[in-house]
Amino acid sequence: MPAEAWWVAAATVVAAVLWTRELAAPLFVDEAASWTVAAQDTWGGFWGLLHRQEIAPPPFYLGLRAVVHGLGADGHSAMRLPVVVASLPVVPFGALLARRIGATPFGVAATGWLLALSPLLLQHGQQVRAYGPAAAAAVAAAVLLLTAAERRWTARWTAAAGIATAGAVWVHYLAAPPLAVLAVGLLWRAPAAPRLRMAVLVLPAWLAAALYARSQYGHAGAGVDGATDLGGLDLERVLATAWQGRVADDPLPRIAGIAALALALVLLAGGSWRRRLVLLAGLSGPALIVAVSALGPDIVTSRYLVPAAPFLLAGIGAALTARPLPIAVAVALSAAAALGTLHQLDPQRGRYADIEAQIAGIGDLPPGAVVASRDASHALYRPAYVGARMGSPRVEGAWGRWAVRQAACDRRIVRQLVPSGVSPEPMLAWWRAAGYAARVRPTATPGIDVVIANPPPTGAPHRCPDAAPPGW
């Protein structure tokens, strides 16, 4: 086995260690949303909630459902470990991608380590969402596309590349931009027959994915929020998110991300056309965010860059040789990656508040209680997940002003988590006006109080509030 293969294998082991360090950390709100879909008792409930809540394709949620129901495992680590296993191939496949575009052995090894130490992949390689597996699927499809081109588009290799390219988009639609750039660029020089084969294999699957996405987009609970234009776009964050992960406010990962993007743009001026093609595929992520934001919705967030980022890093790695200047660049990028990655190993760093501890701090919860959170970071799903994990499957979650109003109209038992610095008086008055008995007390979690709102007894006066709670 070549020496660089051992370096890539070592990088894969390091990535596995880093990505499993946070398996038991509190769930990110979107991870708990994945659980709410997978944990549905019936197939009808599964498909119905998937349609109402998510935009991403079904295969990821079907796999998660197999873990939750087939293995009976829905703890943090049990749900995250399969995601790590599905995401880890991005490291060896990314290194192989660099080799396919002309990387030296040094460049192949450097690519493996850039991917293993990427703060962005650390964040998403273990998250119970489809972005990490989509990155691995996209890079694997890219390797097959380049191999098919090297083998002069024989029927077998074309079929393998076409199936992988079609399937990657069904892991997540965000695999489409980099693969589209690479496939079109490679097929541009191909004979007519392979173009037709690829079109037959890929276009129907991509069209079906597009139609499914269109049917999902815009329904309740899914979609992108807000509206902006380029004047309100945090362009610096867009340029940096391909590297920095979730440490949005720390300068080192942000500087490293911008430097990596600038280096990619410089490298576009030289090298083989295949390397330039892979770099363009990597740049499709930031380009997509800028283009969509210019049209209206604000989707400036790192997860939309995950499938394209390995292409960018493979293109950079392929340009690194054993000459002094590239070595200095490699050392600088690797040092920034290592520091940024180590900085993110704190499980609470950049994560949402530990709703598990906050709900546990409330004390005993009556069956059927609604746990509501004033903080949008807790959202609807995490209280529901924690309620089930605490042995109270009927505990539900609520977030948002009108969800709390509906709970009041339905005469539900409610426990509202609020920061201690927020005055509870307007909220208590609102509950009492609806006929509730309401009081506030601190929880066992410092800085968090709970409003205890119990509905009036049957037959007692009760009024459905006309408006949402004040200050919610």
Image (cartoon, rainbow, N blue to C red):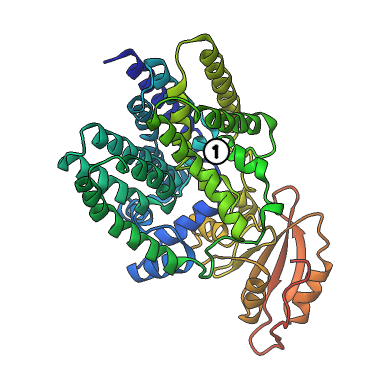
Residue at the (69%, 81%) spot, across then down: 456
Kindly tell me whether residue 303 is visible in this rendering.
no
Q: Which amino acid type is shown beneath numbered disc 1?
A: Ala
* Image quadrant where one finds the N terminus: top left
Q: How many labels were placed on the picture?
A: 1
Question: In the figure, 193 relative to 98: above or below?
Answer: below
In percent of width and height, residue 145 lies at 29, 39
Q: Which residue is mark 1?
A: 242
Question: In the figure, 258 relative to 378: above or below?
Answer: above
Residue at the (21%, 50%) spot, across then down: 197
Return the residue found at the far left: 155
In-front residue for pair 154/82? 154
In percent of width and height, residue 21 lies at 50, 33
In-front residue for pair 226/452? 226
In percent of width and height, residue 341 lies at 56, 29
Residue 87 vs residue 290: left or right?
left
Residue at the (50%, 51%) spot, across then down: 31
Q: Which image quarter: residue 240?
A: top right
Residue at the (68%, 70%) spot, across then down: 401
In-front residue for pair 97/272? 272
Q: Which image quarter: residue 142?
A: top left
In percent of width and height, residue 460 lies at 70, 88
